[in-house]
Amino acid sequence: MTTLTEGKTPGDFLLFEEQDHFSRKEATIASGADLVPGTVLGRVTASGKYVRSVRTASDGSETPAAVLLREAKAADADVTGAVIIARHARVRQLGLTFDASWSTEAYRDTACAALEAAGIVAT
């Protein structure tokens, strides 16, 4: 019998979102990496595209601004119409996927404070 493995789902991290999908937004994920649901995203200032937030970046994406709701296969090309959690939501911090640059608890707390400034509370 074939073994099936379920990947990450919004249920791993999403605790609350505003009714009528108000918390959600369609966005473009810049090419460079396949991302799983729950990935903490930053917004590149020059292009307006979202990428995995890297703490040491200097293009605007170092500031966490959103959380990816559904998988985005962006290794080879931009993904348009990706659904992100951008505002008025509550997420489970332990369910989020951070870039390795957010390596300590203090760094991740800083990232969560930035998400909270965007209206996404991580508990």
Image (cartoon, rainbow, N blue to C red):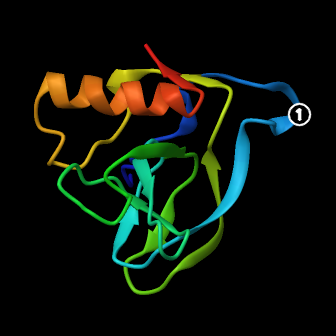
Which quarter of the image is occupied by the C terminus? top left
For the residue labelled by badge 1, is the local secondary structure a helix, a strand or a loop? helix
Q: Is residue 24 left or right of residue 47?
A: right
**Residue extending furthest right?**
20
Give the number of callouts.
1
Camera-side residue: 119 or 72?
119
Q: Is residue 59 left or right of residue 36?
A: left
Can residue 7 be seen at all in this image of the molecule?
Answer: no
Q: Is residue 104 left or right of residue 76?
A: left
Image: 105 above or below 37:
above
Residue 4 picture location, percent across and down? 41, 49
**Residue extending furthest left?**
104
Residue 2 picture location, percent across and down? 38, 55
Can residue 105 be seen at all in this image of the molecule?
Answer: yes
**Residue extending furthest top?**
123
Camera-side residue: 56 or 13?
56
Residue depicted at 88% across the width and 34% down the height: 20
Residue matched to label 1: 20
Camera-side residue: 90 or 60?
60
